Image (cartoon, helix red, strand yellow):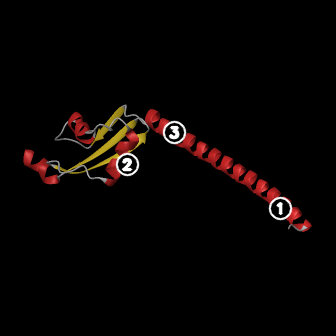
Amino acid sequence: MRFPWQRELNLRLIKYDKKKREEEKKRRKIGLYILLILILLIAAGVFIVMNVFTVENVVVEGNELYSSTQIENMVLNDEYSWNSLYVDLKYRFVDIGEVPFVDTMEVSLDNPHTVHIKVYEKRNARLSLY
């Protein structure tokens, strides 16, 4: 036995469910668009970093005991060293290591294509050569 008001209630529930499903579809669609835009932005960023930040020039300053080529080979010593942004970030967080007669080296970027290496040699190393 059904009451007349139950039929009306069932119709309202069906309309409510249909409306709710449509709203969920819209939300999913918006979420997918946002995800797609984020993926495209990340891909564009990676593309720019890979193509713009390339090492073309290396400026070595303050070296007397080692040649510029030797210093350059000490700093640009792994497979990703062709990327100037990688080199800059790497030597901000990682020390170059022990190099005889060298106190420290500072690595920085002058522009996206130029790596600047400032060498600080140990004071007594220069005196011992003379």
- Left or right of 33 in this view: 92: left
Q: Quadrant of the C terminus?
A: top left
Estimate the x, y position of residue 56 in percent, counting from the top left: 37, 31
- Pick the residue in front: 123 or 5: 5
Disc with the residue nearer the chain's start (2 vs 3):
3
Estimate the x, y position of residue 33 in percent, counting from the top left: 64, 44
Labels 2, 1: front one:
1
Would you call the spot at circle 1 few (<14 residues within 10 Å), some (14-19), or many (20 or more)? few
Tell me, yes or no, if residue 130 can be seen here: no
Q: Are marks 2 and 3 in contact (CB under 8 Å)?
A: no
Under circle 2, the secondary element is: helix
The type of residue carrying mark 3 is Ala
Under circle 1, the secondary element is: helix
Q: Residue at x 19, y 41 (%)?
A: 64
- Left or right of 31 in this view: 53: left
Under circle 3, the secondary element is: helix
Disc with the residue nearer the chain's start (2 vs 1):
1
Q: Are marks 2 and 1 in contact (CB under 8 Å)?
A: no
Residue 81's disc number? none
The type of residue carrying mark 1 is Asn
Residue 10's disc number? 1
Estimate the x, y position of residue 100 in percent, counting from the top left: 14, 48
Residue 43's disc number? 3
